[in-house]
Image (spheres, rainbow, N blue to C red):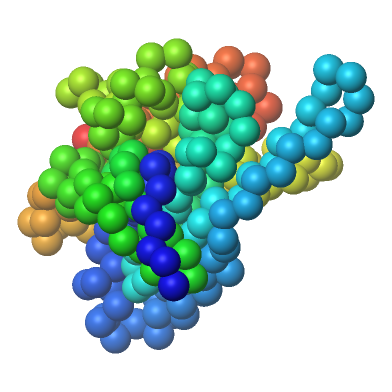
Amino acid sequence: MTLVLEEQVVLFVDLLGFSEASVRDNEELQKNVLALLRSIAEMKSEFSYRSEENEPGSTTHSMVPSISTFSDHIVISYPIDRIEGEDRFRYIMIASQVQQLLSFVAISALEIGFLIRGGMAIGKLYHSAGVVFGEAMVEAFRLESRTAIYPRVVISKPLADKMGSGFEPWVLKDFDGIYRVEYFFSLLAAGILPGEKYAETVQARYRNIVAILRENIVKLDSIGKLNERAKWVWFSRQFAEYLKTISQEVRKFWGVSIDELPLG
């Protein structure tokens, strides 16, 4: 077999607090963790891209990334040259899909008490049949473990130069000048289909998020785990900042009140 390293965008995601939780004698938590890992494992795939001409001037594009999971880690990648179109179109396709996938992973993790953190980079990579190898993977891992700090997914400088300014709302510059994926954009509605109970379902999810944030911030404060507490406060504050961008009419429709979030 010939090893082919392609120019790819790769995303590495870690579930914060997983290692500690996995050894706790808590059957309910372990069941929840197992269910989450199974749902993520079902996302495993090999990259494919298809574009179809529907009618003159109308084209449908569909893209499935390569996805691998191991333990509490998720790797998602996109070979640049296998996506049709100009560079800007390619990176818009990637940024929008990564944002949607991260929203799903983030809300699934949060609902059982975990935050996510990650790194996203560009470079040479081999990703097939569950095997991941190359400089892009190393860089994405370094970003997650050394740079991200908070429960955010940070973007390498070379990749940010390609998908930074002008890629809102999928990509935003953070308070420290580092670009990150804005997965809060779809967090409340991720996986919820429009219907009669749409608003009620979103509201129930929001109430659950608020309760989880409060519980973890209070618990970590009481046992003196201030580094971990800071990550939950950061998440709560970023979530509040995102909600401020939503119109009052939509917040009222969803039954969302920013004042309920624990911010310190």
Quarter assignment of residue 149: top left
Q: Which image quarter holds the C terminus?
A: top left
The residue drawn where x is 31% and y is 42% is: 123
Q: Which image quarter holds the N terminus?
A: bottom left
Residue 24 on image: x %, y %: 26, 81
- In depth, the one of 184 and 202 nearer the eye is 184
The answer to whether residue 140 is left or right of residue 79 is left
Residue 22 on image: x %, y %: 30, 78
The residue drawn where x is 45% and y is 50% is: 77
Location of residue 5 with respect to 159 vertically, above or below: below
Say how many tags the image has.
Answer: 0
Observer able to see residue 256: no
The residue drawn where x is 56% and y is 61% is: 46
Q: Residue furthest right?
A: 55
Location of residue 87 with respect to 207 vertically, above or below: above
Observer able to see residue 226: yes
Quarter assignment of residue 53: top right
- In depth, the one of 228 and 158 nearer the eye is 158
The answer to whether residue 112 is left or right of residue 39 is left
Residue 158 on image: x %, y %: 27, 28
Location of residue 175 with respect to 47 vertically, above or below: above
Quarter assignment of residue 230: top left
The residue drawn where x is 12% and y is 61% is: 223
The answer to whether residue 128 is left or right of residue 180 is right
Q: Residue furthest front?
A: 2
- In depth, the one of 70 and 222 nearer the eye is 70
